[in-house]
Image: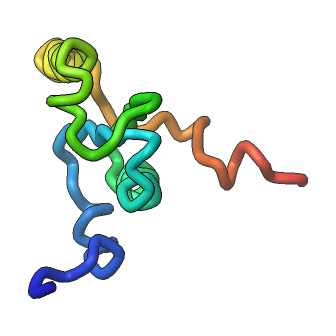
Amino acid sequence: MRRPSLYDVKDELSAMQVPLLVVVGDEDDHSIQPGIFLKRTVPCSGLAMFPKSGHTLNLEEPALFNRVVAEFIAQVEAGRWGPRDPRADPQQIMRAD
């Protein structure tokens, strides 16, 4: 408990410009909300959620994990992993004006 919470470093995370892939299992209750937080906060992030999986995704679903990570690396190397499309901003999508 010596490190700060992810939520305490939101400003620093939102300034990150490096590609980030957040991978969580849908049965890892303690990681789902932090994963969504990271996806919403880090501009160049993506979120992959594995069904019926827990915390040790690389051990539980090694083929899927390797495929998802390999695709992420390929997209980064090809320059196709950029910041979030502004049109996907939830504040814009759900506007009522």
Q: Identify which residue is drawn at 59% across, 38% down.
A: 88
Q: Count up the numbered dots.
A: 0
Is 80 left, or right, of 30 in this rendering?
Answer: left
Q: Identify which residue is drawn at 19% across, 82% down.
A: 4
Q: Is residue 76 above or below residue 14?
A: above
Give how far across and how far down residue 48 sits, in percent: 38, 32
Q: Identify which residue is drawn at 30% across, 81% down.
A: 8
Q: Identify which residue is drawn at 46% across, 59% down.
A: 33
Outermost residue on the bottom side: it is 2
Q: Quadrant of the C terminus?
A: bottom right
Q: Residue 25 appears in which quarter of the rendering?
A: top left
Q: Residue 45 appears in which quarter of the rendering?
A: top left
Is 82 left, or right, of 3 in this rendering?
Answer: right
Mark yes or no: residue 44 visible. no
Give how far across and how far down residue 84 sits, in percent: 43, 38
Q: Is residue 74 above or below residue 90?
A: above
Q: Is residue 53 above or below residue 79?
A: below
Is 27 left, or right, of 58 in this rendering?
Answer: right
Is 57 left, or right, of 28 in this rendering?
Answer: left
Give how far across and how far down residue 17 sits, in percent: 21, 48
Give how far across and how far down residue 46 sits, in percent: 36, 36
Q: Quadrant of the N terminus?
A: bottom left
Mark yes or no: residue 4 visible. yes
Task: Give the colour scheme shown.
Answer: rainbow
Q: Nearer the viewer, residue 40 or 93?
A: 40
